[in-house]
Amino acid sequence: MTLAQLTAMKAWQVAHRAGQPVEYHACDAVLTLWLVGWMGAPAMVVLDQPWAVLACVALFFAPRHYVALRRALHRRGQLRCDWLGAVEPASQPSAGPPQAG
């Protein structure tokens, strides 16, 4: 996920916090794990803890896996996920017909 997608997801969560508090807290938990990964990896390298470094690196991908899980559950109709549109990458605009020149 890009930082713009993370920002869009968080903005949607904040805007809809009153109506969907569980979604808001789940998003916070995922972003907290992501931050623990980024902040913990250098510390674990300094403390010479290779398994902890691997765990922290795995946490780098927590938001991506969370969105993938929510997308899959949404597509199967098991869980409604209204914020997916906020993190979907924008489609590339078509270039249009070639210009004569």
Image (tube, grey):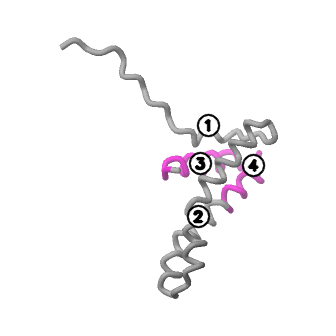
Is 52 placed above or below 9 here? below
Q: CA distance from mark 4 to mark 1?
A: 19 Å
Q: Nearer the viewer, mark 4 or mark 3?
A: 3
Of the residues shown, which amino acid type is indicated by label 1? Gly
Residue marked by disc 1: 85
- Of the numbered discs 3 and 1, the one sitting upstream in the chain is 3
| Position in image of residue 5 (x %, y %) | 53, 47
- Work out whether 81 lies above or below 65: above
The C terminus, quarter of image: top left
Q: Nearer the viewer, residue 58 or 38?
A: 58
Under circle 4, the secondary element is loop
Q: Residue at x 75, y 48 (%)?
A: 18
Mark 3 nearby-residue class (10 Å; few <14, some 14–19, many ≥20) = some
The answer to which of marks 3 and 2 sits earlier in the sequence is 3
Residue drawn at x 49%, y 52% is 3
**Spatial CA span between label 2 and label 4:** 24 Å
Viewer-side label of 2, 4: 2
Camera-nearest label, 3 or 2: 2
Q: Is residue 49 left or right of residue 84?
A: left
Q: Earlier in the sequence, mark 2 or mark 4?
A: 4
